Amino acid sequence: MAQGKVEICGVNTSKLPLLKNAEKEELFSKIEEGDKAAREQYIEGNLRLVLSVIKRFSSSNENVDDLFQIGCIGLIKAIDNFDSTLNVKFSTYAVPMIIGEIRRFLRDNNSIRVSRSLKDTAYKAIYAKENLTRRNLKEPTINEIATEIGISKEDIVYALDAIQNPMSLYEPIYTDGGDTLYVMDQISDKKNKEETWVEHLSLSEAMKRLGEREHEIITLRFFEGKTQMEVAEIIGISQAQVSRLEKNALRVMKNYLTA
């Protein structure tokens, strides 16, 4: 990756604008009203953020122009999904999204191609390992993982060896104060839903202690297997708000059940 490059993708990085906080707030208000010109200005005013992120990948052999373009995609996604009502800086929300977009590009663009079936097997194994560890409070053996997902241990070992740098389901992707969103919050699993343990609790009475919105979130998340992103779209609020309400609802239910 070239260092100290001034012009990237036809953009003179030495002349990129730097927005003040007041300007950012004003522009975002216009963006929320559908102002496309404000959106373009906001993107341009945050390109320095993309530059700072791609420096973290300086050891990569990828072309800096490509990384910058991918980083810009992450920036645009962050702008389109950012909830300005949250007490969090835009950069705090945007940086993990930009990094994630670049990591996906580097993974998918790896010269060693891994088949989709191998990736699926590896990710199933990783997910099963996390579930078994949480359930049994100890790391499972390959045999236990194989039994859990119904795949031979040889295939699991081969698949795990085939992928590089698998991401933990507990890797944080966004932090809003004390509320952290993890990779596993983005994943739905049709087999190992949380209902496998909540069914053993007195949920009917516990859920009566919840507000209408929290009740709906718990139902969608743990009985219908929806991801937090899917729940957010159904209810019409941000994913961070879903995470906060879900944690509060589970806390209320736990307090009732353990009282």
Image (cartoon, rainbow, N blue to C red):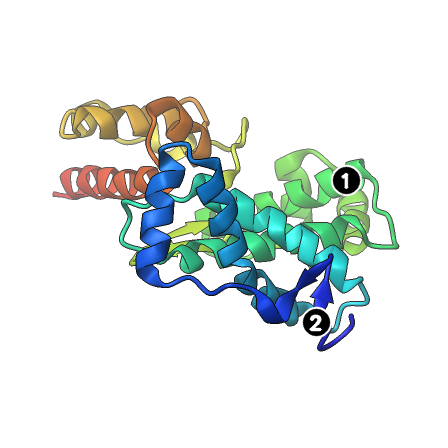
Mark nearest the camera among 2 and 1 is 2
Task: Say which quadrant the N terminus sits in.
Answer: bottom right
Q: Earlier in the sequence, mark 2 or mark 1?
A: 2
Tell me the number on the disc at residue 85.
Answer: none
Looking at the picture, does residue 86 appear above or below residue 208? below
Q: On the picture, is 213 further left or further right than 134?
A: left
Q: Answer whether residue 93 is visible to the viewer in this image.
A: yes
Write down the quadrant of residue 68 in the picture.
Answer: bottom right
In the image, what residue occupies the spot 52% across and 50% down? 43
Q: Three-letter amino acid code at disc 2?
A: Val
Q: Which residue is mark 2?
A: 6
Q: On the picture, is 113 further left or further right than 168?
A: right
Q: CA distance from mark 2 to mark 1?
A: 52 Å
Across and down, in percent, residue 29 comes to: 32, 42
Q: Three-letter amino acid code at disc 1?
A: Ser
Looking at the picture, does residue 149 appear above or below residue 171? above
Across and down, in percent, residue 254 comes to: 21, 42
Across and down, in percent, residue 181 comes to: 42, 49
Write down the quadrant of residue 23 in the picture.
Answer: bottom left
In the image, what residue occupies the spot 22% across and 44% down? 251
Is 7 or 234 nearer to us in this picture?
A: 7
In the image, what residue occupies the spot 16% across and 28% down? 211
Q: Which residue is mark 1?
A: 152
In the image, what residue occupies the spot 49% across and 47% down? 78
| Secondary element type, mark 1 | loop
Q: On the picture, is 70 further left or further right than 115?
A: left
Is 245 or 126 nearer to us in this picture?
A: 245
Is 144 or 35 nearer to us in this picture?
A: 35
